[in-house]
Image: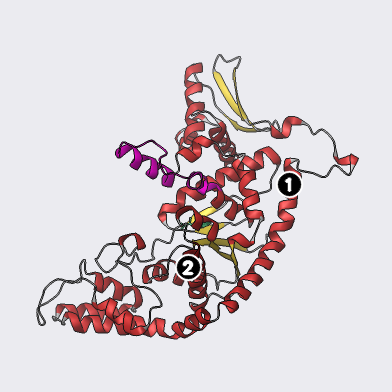
């Protein structure tokens, strides 16, 4: 048995002020998960990522403080988890470069954030890359470095980030193939049960819609903002629908099942909007108020937050510094002082896996997938034509797991661990193939 704890890692870009949507969707569930003793948590402030979309130094500094103070006030314990600032770990940008060199440019062309920017340019009749920084283009590689640096197993993220985790896996697989097993292949964790909080106008609460309620505004201000949540014009005494009511959904994200049930009843009984809003405010404030004091104290004493982040940086560097030395050695960035180290390695290590096609005495056409080390990973049964065998190979390299399932009957049986190895090799071949 492996006694190693599961490493969970996630980053928060430091461009905004945390709002109730961030709290319900990320901060609260993450802080809860961070208390699981079977996991080891890495939580960091992605301030290098912030530079991609923000060129206001004061805003980045302010946001870094607000986000750090929010997470700590919400219960994240820097003595239990590793809580750090990305820019305090110089090995992260260093690793970004190593990964840049094993990532296909075409892969980055297909990254959602970059594609959205170029699609927008096309639609507006502008040059493909107008106003697109190379930073935006490289965003997934920096994120890959964040994740792979600490050998994270699980990465809790929103839906929109899944593609980035898959890219990080591909980078890890391709580096491992070239240089040996150094990286852990991470997995995205998308919490389906976490509520998406609506904002003041009923759309998803998001800074880009300007409809947010800050997590830690003073209580009087929070009350005002809750009063500004849109409702319909039903008068007191008229039954109200919970369906599609932003107010109700926000309440539900904070209330117990029983409280929610009571609120639904009050809606049916025609509670006045003003009274409902008062109850929603009170329920949220009950949860937030105890944290508010800590938050305000930390905002008044940024040096306290700085000390916590320095502690986090120390813990992070204990991992990242030796690991980076290992990686330098692996790729050949090595000291020349010791003659013994200056040697030529067999090239088989850096060879790619390959498919071998052949015809047997039975007149049928076969193929096998051979690892760089010469191990047969996958063996086909006989095909009647070389074309069919070739098609199956093409399916496998482009579609991976789903093709492997579809072609099961035409393959010799493989064990689950062997299957993983096959998929890893297929992913690698897909990555280096020209598309
Ligand atoms: N890109 C993430 C976001 O916008 C933030 C982030 C940066 C991140 N690096 C990460 C998340 C590494 C998880 C792991 O939400």
Nearer to the camera, 392 or 299 = 299
Q: Is 139 situated above or below 294?
A: above
According to the image, label 2 marks what residue?
63
Residue drawn 33% across the image and 78% down it: 255
For marks 2 and 1, the one nearer the N-term is 2
Q: Position of residue 94 (x, y in %)?
A: 65, 50
Q: Is mark 2 within 8 Å of ligand 1?
A: no
- Residue at x-position 34% and y-position 63%: 206
113 in the magenta segment: yes
Is residue 269 among what the camera can see?
yes
Residue, disc 1: 328
Residue nearer the viewer, 365 or 235: 235
Point out residue 362 in the picture as x, y percentages from the top left corner: 57, 15
Measuring from the top left, give residue 303's x and y in whole percent: 59, 77
- Tell how many labels: 2
Residue beneath the point at 26% across and 84% down = 279
Q: Residues within 10 Å of mark 1 (few under 14, many from 20)?
A: some
Give the residues in magenta: 112-141
In the rendered image, which quarter is residue 181 located in?
A: top right
Q: Nearer the viewer, mark 2 or mark 1?
A: 2
Image quadrant where one finds the N terminus: bottom right
């Amino acid at each position: 048995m492996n006694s190693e704890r599961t490493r969970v890692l996630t980053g928060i870009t430091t461009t905004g002020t945390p709002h109730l949507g961030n709290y319900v969707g990320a901060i609260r569930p993450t802080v809860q998960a961070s208390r699981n003793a079977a996991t080891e948590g890495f939580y960091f402030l992605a301030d290098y990522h912030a530079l991609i979309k923000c060129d206001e130094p004061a805003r980045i500094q302010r946001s870094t403080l607000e986000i750090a103070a929010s997470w700590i006030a919400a219960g994240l314990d820097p003595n239990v988890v590793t809580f750090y600032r990305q820019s305090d770990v110089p090995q992260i940008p260093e690793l970004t470069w190593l990964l840049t060199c094993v990532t296909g440019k075409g892969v980055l062309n297909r990254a959602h954030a970059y594609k959205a920017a170029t699609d927008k340019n096309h639609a507006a009749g502008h040059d493909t890359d107008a106003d697109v920084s190379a930073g935006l283009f490289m965003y997934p590689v920096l994120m890959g470095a964040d994740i792979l640096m600490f050998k994270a197993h699980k990465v809790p993220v929103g839906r929109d980030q899944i593609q980035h985790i898959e890219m990080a896996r591909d980078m890890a697989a391709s580096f491992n193939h070239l240089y040996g097993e150094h990286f852990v292949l991470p997995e995205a964790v998308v919490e389906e049960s976490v509520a998406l909080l609506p904002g003041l106008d009923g759309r998803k609460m998001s800074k880009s819609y300007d409809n947010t309620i800050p997590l830690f505004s003073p209580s009087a201000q929070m009350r005002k903002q809750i009063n500004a949540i849109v409702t319909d014009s039903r008068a007191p005494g008229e039954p109200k629908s919970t369906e599609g009511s932003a107010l109700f959904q926000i309440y539900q994200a904070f209330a117990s099942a029983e409280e929610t049930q009571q609120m639904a009843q009050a809606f049916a009984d025609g509670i006045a909007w003003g009274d409902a809003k008062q109850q929603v405010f009170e329920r949220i404030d009950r949860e937030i108020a105890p944290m508010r004091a800590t938050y305000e104290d930390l905002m008044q004493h940024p040096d306290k937050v700085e000390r916590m982040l320095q502690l986090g940086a120390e813990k992070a560097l204990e991992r990242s510094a030796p690991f980076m030395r290992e990686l330098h050695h692996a790729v050949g960035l090595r000291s020349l002082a010791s003659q013994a180290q200056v040697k030529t390695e067999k090239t088989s290590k850096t060879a790619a896996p390959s498919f071998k096609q052949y015809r047997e005495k039975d007149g049928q056409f076969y193929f096998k997938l051979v690892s760089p080390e010469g191990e047969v990973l996958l063996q086909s049964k006989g095909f009647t034509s070389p074309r069919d065998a070739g098609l199956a190979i093409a399916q496998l390299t482009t579609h991976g797991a789903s093709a492997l399932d579809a072609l099961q009957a035409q393959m010799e049986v493989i064990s689950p661990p062997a299957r993983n190895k096959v998929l890893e090799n297929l992913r690698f071949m897909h990555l280096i193939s020209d598309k």
